[in-house]
Amino acid sequence: MSDRVRQFTEFIRRRWPLLVMPAVILAVFAPFITPPSGYLLFGDDFFRSYGFFRQYFARSLSGGEMPWWNPYLFSGMPFAANPSVSFWYPPNLLYLILPYGTAYIMILIFHIAVAAAGVYYLLRKAMRPGTGELPAAAAGITFALSGYFSARIWSGHVDTIAAQSYMPWVVGAMFLLWQKPSVRRLAAASLALAVQIYAGYQTMAMYTLEIVALAVMLFSLYRKSLRPLVLTAAAVIGGLGFAALQMIPNWEFFGRSIRTFPMPYEYLSRGSLVWGSLIQLLYPFHWGDQYSFRGPPPNYGEQAMYVGVVGIVLAVAALIIYLPKFFEFPGARKKDENIIYVAIFAAAAVISVWLALGPNAPYDLNRFLWEYVPLYRGIRHPSRHLIQFVLAASVLTGVGLSRVKHRFLQLMLTALLIADMGIFARHFLELKPAPETRHDRLLVAGLTGGGGPYRLLQNFGTWVPPRDALDFDAAVVYGIFSATGYDPSILRNYYEFADAVNGNPGTGILEHNVQIPYLNTASPYIGFLNIRYILVPIGYDPVGGSPDRYSLIAENPQEGYRLYENRSVSPRFFAVKTVTILPARSDVAAAVRSNTGDISETVYAASGDVSNDAATQPSDCKSGSDVRIVLSEYTVNRITLKTQSDCNAVLASSEVMYPGWTASIDGRPAKLFESNLAFRTLILPRGTHTVEMRFVPRTVAFGLSITFGTALLFAFILRTDAFRKGV
């Protein structure tokens, strides 16, 4: 036997538990890696939204265009800055190389493996003394196949799964930094946090930092030193610096989205656990599964926390074993330093369940955070804190298993745990026809053909069956311009416009938080919005009674929809005679609500929003004036118009205003301003001109400079540190 073969055999003999994690993950997911043609591993939100975003991302980059903007949903919105997109996250580049269905399953399996390896790393390397390899591997499988991961696969929460998979890596990197501080470990902790932020759903990074905050307080007390606090602050600042390229555009978008609407706590806390929810730790389907769930709202996926019966028993055993040592804290340090880590994760488990209970807890700790922590005012479903419980319980499972000294019993418990978690996880994995296979091809062809560009309005709820004929967000794949969409982050100015069109002096955000409210089809602003087609359910048809404005052009009883054509649609860009300048934005909203103005004659703007040109050089167009506007180019980030006018006119549009959009007339900068609450407008001088609008997000350059500066700073410090050690 050669030395190489002997070394490999010895490695397998000694380190075989390392192979358990990938073997189990592959066994669970193997049937779904190469599905039959036309089928994909089902994930609800991936089928309804994220999958279309990934295809748009890949198609744009493959075509040589940076998709900063998404012109297809909600009459236009940022794309790269949308947190749901995870634009700068490197694994998403797989969508450029592989078919999107293949890339989807590969990236999903990658994150399941990252989650398992993270807990293994946490138990083996970051805790002192670490556990054995088999307990660490078993704990990793527990975490990666837990209810919080498995149920979310079925829900299609790909960004949540990606972000939560890095939670143990961030916590472990912080532990190592506190134990033996170094520049390298500081950089590693910062990078781990940054990668988690890039992965998406940044609430997970906040939940991770909550565990870190709890841990650093206990660790500092344990070590009687403030150094861990200082190191943690430095690592967090470094992580935010590394992630600035994504965070700064995300936060600009968030600050202008509907997530800034003040929402009552009673609404945000919907989705809290009840005490009876804890029975799911032993009987995960006590209240039904993803199809039949009858427990607390909103659904099974938001309540899932199963870590296996064996896992719970082992986690409780770890607490029982270490509980006496909690009362001899200093004296136990030299005997078994795991006591501090057990204390950290025990506290994390208790506090996370406390937060998840929301108003059902004896004292509503979640409400306390809602009142005093601004970030909590936009976070729904306290039950999402359960990821902290799942991580803590998984780690404690590994600690408990490591205390089983009988090797055969340890192997048997591991086998039972793996079988339990594997069977549980497979319950949420199923193949279903890919979204494009159920879309109505005739409907899509009708909406993408003809002149334009014109918009479609799907004037029904995102849960109503006609969506199967054409998913709301499928518009980005087919190149259909839509006045609505399916996204939890809608631009606030556009949503306020929709409320005003409906005559609503308040907001419909509590009823519609992933789409705009159903629009009043009798409003003249339907035409202003460039809506040529309206899709409605047969069972709820507010359009059919308006034959003077709408023509029925298609009906499909099988899919349950009717398609109408609007005969009074305005072009995307058109001229009006005047800008009606009003004192405040609330006055503009009132003017739109009234529906009394002539949209072909004027637009409304708040005095603080209008350009100097609009204020000092009003339009001099009269009824016989000749103004011609021709759309010569319309791409994702650039629009070119050819105009000819015998008067100073106002160029109105139904294109949504957002920072980063600029305009020029014949190559000279022109001032864009916001009219009718949400739309790009400018003063168009008489004569023949070329008008260009470009979207160049300045926050990307700003974020890139911070990320690059952070990288340079760490590189300099690391190099200096290496030089100093070398000397």
Image (cartoon, rainbow, N blue to C red):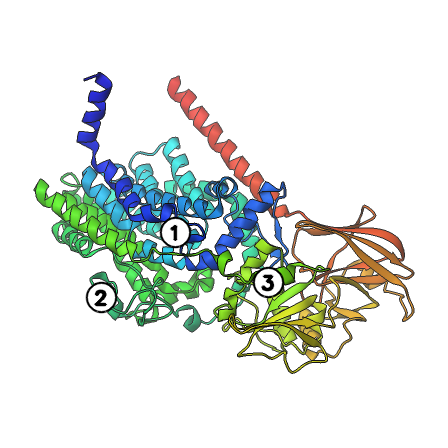
Q: Residue at x 51, y 71 (%)?
A: 558
**Residue 155 point in image, percent of width and height:** 39, 59
Q: Is residue 419 left or right of residue 85?
A: left
Q: Which mark is residue 244?
A: none
Foreground disc of the pair 2, 3: 3
Foreground disc of the pair 3, 1: 3
Task: Give the mark nearest the N terminus, 2 or 3.
Answer: 2
Q: Residue at x 49, y 53 (%)?
A: 51
Task: Give the mark nearest the N terminus, 1 or 2.
Answer: 1
130 shown above or below 343 = above
Which kind of residue does numbered mark 2 sit on? Ile
Q: Which residue is mark 3?
A: 442
Q: Which mark is residue 161?
A: 1
538 shown above or below 199 = below
**Residue 515 point in image, percent of width and height:** 54, 66
Q: Is residue 113 left or right of residue 480?
A: left
Q: Quadrant of the N terminus?
A: top left
Q: Residues within 10 Å of mark 2 (few under 14, many from 20)?
A: few
**Residue 209 point in image, percent of width and height:** 38, 50
504 shown above or below 330 = below
Q: Residue at x 52, y 32 (%)?
A: 712
Q: Is residue 81 left or right of residue 725?
A: right
Disc 3 to disc 1, C-alpha distance: 35 Å
Q: Residues within 10 Å of mark 3 (few under 14, many from 20)?
A: few
Q: Quadrant of residue 359?
A: bottom left
Kindly state the secondary structure of the residue where label 3 is placed: helix
